[in-house]
Amino acid sequence: MSEKSKAELLKEELYMTKKNAYETMSQEEIKECYDYCEDYKMFLDKCKTERESVEFAVKYLEERGFKSFEYGKEYKTGDKFYLNNRGKAIYIVVMGKRPLEEGVRIAAAHVDSPRIDLKQNPLYEDGGFAFFKTHYYGGIKKFQWVTIPLAIHGVIVKANGEKVNVCIGEDDSDPVFYITDILPHLGKDQASKNLGSAFNGEQLNILCGSRPYEDEKVKDIKLNILSILKEKYDITEADFLSSELCVVPSIKARDLGFDRSLIAAYGHDDRVCAYPILTACADSCEKDLPTYTTVTIFADKEETGSDGNTGMQSFAFEDMLKEMCENAQQNVRKMFSNSICLSADVNACFDPNFSEVYESRNTAYINKGVCVTKFTGGGGKSSTNDAHAEFVAFIRKLFDDNGVVWQTGELGKVDQGGGGTVAKFISKLNADVIDVGVPVISMHAPCEVVSKTDVWAAYKAFLCFFK
Ligand code: MN
Ligand code: MN
């Protein structure tokens, strides 16, 4: 081997190079990563809504000795508990070795994903079909949701409080649901519209039947659907008023590509961060306790602005920590001021087919690890938590010291658009916050794509943060 030239050595010293994860991982670690992603795919298939994700978390935590949070109780080092906020958000705590006043370590992901909700008076008959009226949830590109198989997940709460769980369209023997589109032969007018106006919200009606009720006098398709629902769920039309029924793609998480290096699934945003923070939380207290108390959050309503009492703008989370501090005679303000948080949410992954919307030097790439995002927002850095350089330096060192494959990225080109996360709401509590998450291809589409090594890098990042 010839000696390196002065310029070559200088380049190594001065240039920043971010390697592909496969260049840094051993064969054993790649196997561990792929095995971990098998469990992640199972989580994706079980958890398509926030309710299902919280239910999964509760079961997962109880199997590992976590208890339900109690008001008025003084929690001590080693205690593990969770607050289930109305079945839609959950705050999970492991009491660390250091007192609360020295700060807690928070990782917050959201478990709601863009989808299509049923309206409160959804069922009607038209043109020989039965349909459900819908109201979409979150930022969807409407044209992506037509002509694909759909499933319905959610709850119907009867006036007497009885709750009926609904999950139909997932089992291979289940029927699926569908949104129609114009055939290309008659699509002249539609094809001349732009993508944003070619489909409107009131056209996203869910096709759910076509067979009339069998009766001599009444040939009613809607009545037939209602009688099936009465038999299956024991509900009447009025029960839709107090229901939350979510229409999601009826697809299972699948390996993508000959090399199985990618995962195609619904709802990576943001379950691809939720699963790693949950497993990192449990694994970080398996053998030894974490130094600082850890708080793991599954938030709801992120896709619609974090409003509502299960969203991150609610006082529910803050109140829980206040309660913990009061009962332990600790100053809650001091606790928040010493706390640090990873807002665990996805970023856009560079897509060479649409390179025009990305700025190649400041974007996240596939297989280059978990993405650290200093700020989100839009325009001139508006509406964002912009992490301080001091905190970014701390995170750099933490990830480098723990062999985390990581990169940085902005959400696309300046003035191309923008987006937000829960980071700015948690920063209001006076904690230091930064966004850390997995790069996603085709974010918010019914089927999104991530890389297995990036999921693994996220898990490792959250694990070392908690430890
Ligand atoms: Mn998100
Ligand atoms: Mn999103």
Image (cartoon, helix red, strand yellow):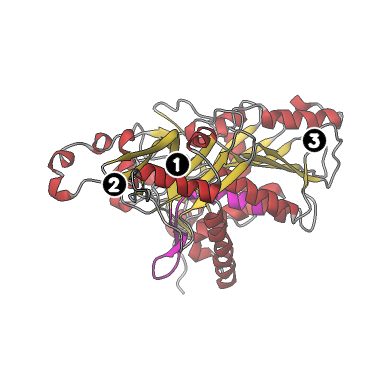
Three-letter residue code for mark 2 = Thr
Outermost residue toward the bottom in this view: 1
Circle 1 sits on which residue? 114
- Name the mark on residue 180: 2
Three-letter residue code for mark 1 = Pro
Where residue 416 sits: x, y (%)? 33, 34
Q: Look at the numbered disc 1 and say if its residue's Cβ is closer than 8 Å to ligand 2.
A: yes
Looking at the image, how many numbered discs can be counted on the residues? 3
Q: Quadrant of residue 405?
A: bottom right
Segment colored magenta: 250-279
Q: Residues within 10 Å of mark 3 (few under 14, many from 20)?
A: many
Residue 15 visible to an observer of this rendering: no
Residue at 40 percent of width and 47 percent of height = 224
Vertically, is 352 above or below 50?
A: below
Vertically, is 414 above or below 92?
A: above
Circle 3 sits on which residue? 100
Sooner in the amino-acid sequence: mark 1 or mark 2: 1
Residue 102 located within the stretch drawn in magenta? no
Q: Is mark 2 in CB contact (under 8 Å) with mark 3?
A: no
Sooner in the amino-acid sequence: mark 1 or mark 3: 3
Residue at 27 percent of width and 35 percent of height = 196
Q: Quadrant of residue 317?
A: top right
Q: Look at the numbered disc 3 and say if its residue's Cβ is closer than 8 Å to ligand 1.
A: no
